[in-house]
């Protein structure tokens, strides 16, 4: 529960809304407020701080934009401390399960679909099969710490028995262990999109909320394509990173 804030300093040149942001940041980082905790209502909090609701809203909007707070509309809504964002590094080819292990979080999967379907055009092109050829589609909601963070939709070649396996864990580990098709390289494209109603419902967000689409084709060591995927990540819960470096001469 948030404690009563200290008095804001006047005449320091630091705007009131910035002081409010700093105080809330410190309260969260110190553990006084935990993910899911609800802040007092705007009227009460503005009164505590001795500022207008407009000034308070300016601070809350900045913290929401930075992913520190989540604001929900309605009578049961308000401002809540957000779950910390998970770092996902695209530099290597670690799957979601491994990424969550690195972040010391438990990765969970809820299967939405696991079926053999005629290959859509994009999947067929990526997997180098004729359009309409049978491929395996696996759609899952991925969670970290019981909070949904991603909606995965992957297409795989028509591998025998794939859909009979446990599909709640690492599919890359499954490809490696059962089919000797460990993904070794991938080409990935990132695009910002907005959540459609069905996607929003699965991810627990509002329709129209921003999402990050990662479109990926993964390849085995010999260059065989083994997965075509379209993954939707919640940017309020996942931060995408890529490491880069210089491997040879550079130009200006």
Image: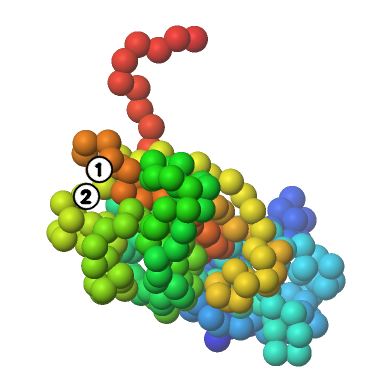
- The spot of residue 216 in percent (x, y) is 43, 47
Q: Residue at x 36, y 51 (%)?
A: 227
Give above or below for 83 relative to 85. below
Return the mark for residue 182.
2
Cα gap from disc 2 to disc 1, whole angstroms:
6 Å
Give above or below for 21 relative to 239. below
- Of residues 111 and 245, the one nearer the viewer is 111
Q: Point out the image quarter for the N terminus.
A: bottom right
Return the mark for residue 220.
1
- The spot of residue 157 in percent (x, y) is 33, 53
- The spot of residue 190 in percent (x, y) is 53, 44
Q: Which colour scheme appears in the figure?
A: rainbow
Disc 1 residue crowd, few under 14, some 14–19, many 20+, Cα 10 Å: some
Query: Which quadrant holds residue 174?
Result: bottom left
Question: Tag count in the figure?
Answer: 2
Return the mark for residue 130.
none
Q: Residue at x 52, y 59 (%)?
A: 232
Query: Which quadrant holds residue 79?
Result: bottom right
The answer to whether marks 2 and 1 mark residues whose Cβ atoms lie closer than 8 Å is yes
Give above or below for 220 relative to 108. above
Disc 2 residue crowd, few under 14, some 14–19, many 20+, Cα 10 Å: some
Residue 33 in the figure: left or right of residue 43: left
Q: Residue furthest bottom?
A: 75
């Amino acid at each position: 529960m948030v404690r009563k804030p200290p008095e804001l300093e006047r005449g320091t040149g630091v705007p009131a809304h910035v002081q409010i942001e700093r105080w809330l940041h410190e309260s969260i980082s110190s553990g006084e407020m935990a993910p899911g905790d609800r802040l007092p209502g705007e009227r009460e909090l503005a009164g505590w701080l001795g500022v207008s609701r407009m000034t308070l809203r300016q601070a809350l909007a900045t913290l929401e934009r930075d992913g520190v707070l989540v604001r929900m509309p309605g009578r049961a809504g308000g401002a809540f401390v957000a779950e910390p964002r998970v770092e996902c590094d695209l530099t290597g080819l670690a799957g979601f399960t491994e990424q969550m292990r690195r972040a010391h979080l438990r990765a969970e999967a809820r299967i939405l679909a696991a079926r053999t379907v005629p290959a859509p055009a994009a999947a067929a092109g990526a997997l180098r099969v004729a359009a309409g050829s049978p491929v395996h589609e696996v759609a899952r909601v991925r969670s970290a710490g019981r909070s949904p963070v991603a909606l995965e939709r992957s297409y795989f070649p028509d591998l025998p028995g794939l859909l009979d396996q446990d599909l709640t864990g690492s599919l890359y580990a499954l490809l490696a262990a059962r089919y000797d098709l460990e993904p070794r390289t991938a080409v990935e494209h990132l695009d910002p999109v907005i959540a459609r109603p069905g996607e929003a419902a699965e991810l627990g967000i509002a329709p129209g909320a921003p999402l990050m689409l990662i479109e990926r084709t993964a390849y085995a060591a010999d260059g065989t394509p083994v997965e075509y995927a379209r993954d939707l990540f919640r940017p309020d819960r996942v931060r995408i990173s890529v490491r880069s470096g210089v491997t040879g001469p550079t130009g200006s």
